[in-house]
């Protein structure tokens, strides 16, 4: 296999971690350092056109992985990850490389997993996701986190996971619940006083919260969670239960599995894909689908 590293120096200790790896590698590889939002996608699209790289290993967090995934698209490139960043929801579920020797063993004896990928479409906008996508409160928290100067500081102290609870409290002061129409498995439901809708490919979001405990990235299903019809105080109590995945029996939490989901918004709302925030409006439905076994993931082999 031919290898390229995509390194995000702004994610945790991306450059430092990569330097620790590269000094112990004896195999040939290329290195690409990202320098702005969206750069990883642009690099990978170039590599796809070149048709020489078959394995891309990301040194970065969920946002960098998200960008690389959208660069790969449908092409036959294997994705691997060296865990880094503040959220690391990808690394809580999927396997990641922990040592340079694991990379070399994989090159010699590649073991891959075919996993599902989620797709969101809104008018002409579309994105692929590994972890989850959300509309509402969780997306607002993502927006705050991504703009935060505190994020880089906490990452240096290895305390990046604490940034999400901080901005949960901040978002509670400004967020206004909303109404949506959700179509799941052919049934359409109007939800009032909605805090968020999350569509998941794996259990974790928001830096370790177990929003969809039963989600699996190879079951060809979306796990759809709607939190609605509760006040701010009750919502905050519920939010901490999510870390342990103990929220599903609550009367204001609805969760179902589906192959396709459609969400109709009334007004413009903040949304996210794998923690990358953006805005959607009510002009088009927000459509979610699962792409079965869409991506090849590198599976590192651990030495016992």
Image (spheres, helix red, strand yellow):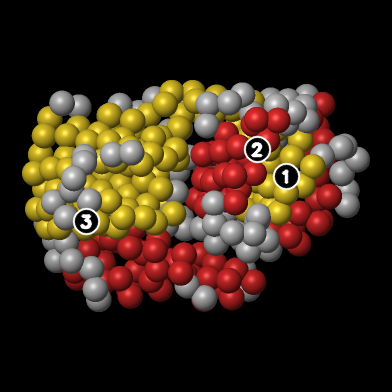
| Camera-nearest label, 3 or 2 | 2
Q: Quadrant of the N terminus?
A: top right
Give whichever of 179, 21 is nearer the camera. Answer: 179
Q: Are marks 1 and 3 in contact (CB under 8 Å)?
A: no
Element type at mark 2: helix
Of the numbered discs 3 and 2, the one sitting upstream in the chain is 2
Residue 268, labelled with which disc?
3
Task: Report crowding for label 3: few under 14, some 14 to 19, many 20 or more residues within 10 A (C-alpha).
Answer: few
Give whichever of 154, 43 is nearer the camera. Answer: 43
Residue 46, labelled with which disc?
2
Q: Are marks 3 and 2 in contact (CB under 8 Å)?
A: no
Residue at 13% across / 43% down in the picture?
181
Of the numbered discs 1 and 3, the one sitting upstream in the chain is 1
Q: Quadrant of the C terminus?
A: top right
Whole-Å distance between the Cαs marked 3 and 2? 34 Å
Image coordinates of residue 75 in percent, x first then y, are 58, 26
| Camera-nearest label, 1 or 3 | 3
| Camera-nearest label, 2 or 1 | 2
- Can residue 175 be spotted in the picture? yes
Element type at mark 1: strand
């Amino acid at each position: 296999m031919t290898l390229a590293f995509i390194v995000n120096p702004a994610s945790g200790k991306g450059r430092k971690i990569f330097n620790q790896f590269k000094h112990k590698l004896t195999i040939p590889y290329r290195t690409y350092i990202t320098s702005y939002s969206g750069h990883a996608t642009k690099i990978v699209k170039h590599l796809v056109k070149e048709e020489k790289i078959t394995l891309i290993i990301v040194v970065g967090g969920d946002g960098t992985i998200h960008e690389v995934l959208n660069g790969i698209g449908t092409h036959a490139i294997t994705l691997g990850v060296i865990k880094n960043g503040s959220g690391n929801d990808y690394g809580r579920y999927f396997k990641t490389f922990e040592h340079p020797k694991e990379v070399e063993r994989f090159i010699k004896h590649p073991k891959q997993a075919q996993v599902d990928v989620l797709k969101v479409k809104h008018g002409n906008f579309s994105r692929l996701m590994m972890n989850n996508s959300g509309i509402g409160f969780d997306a607002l928290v993502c927006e705050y986190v991504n703009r935060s100067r505190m994020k880089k500081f906490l990452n240096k102290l290895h305390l990046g996971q604490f940034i999400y609870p901080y901005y949960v409290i901040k978002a509670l002061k400004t967020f206004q619940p909303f109404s949506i129409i959700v179509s799941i498995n052919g049934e359409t439901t109007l939800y009032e006083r909605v805090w968020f809708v999350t569509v998941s490919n794996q259990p974790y979001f928001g830096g370790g919260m177990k929003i969809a405990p039963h989600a699996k990235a190879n079951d060809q299903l979306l796990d759809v969670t709607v939190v609605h019809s509760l006040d701010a105080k009750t919502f905050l109590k519920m939010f901490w239960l999510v870390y342990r995945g103990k929220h599903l029996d609550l009367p204001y939490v609805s969760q179902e599995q589906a192959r396709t989901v459609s969400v109709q918004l009334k007004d413009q709302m903040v949304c996210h894909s794998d923690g990358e925030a953006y805005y959607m409006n009510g002009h088009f439905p927000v459509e979610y689908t699962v792409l079965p076994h869409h991506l090849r993931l590198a599976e590192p082999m651990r030495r016992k």
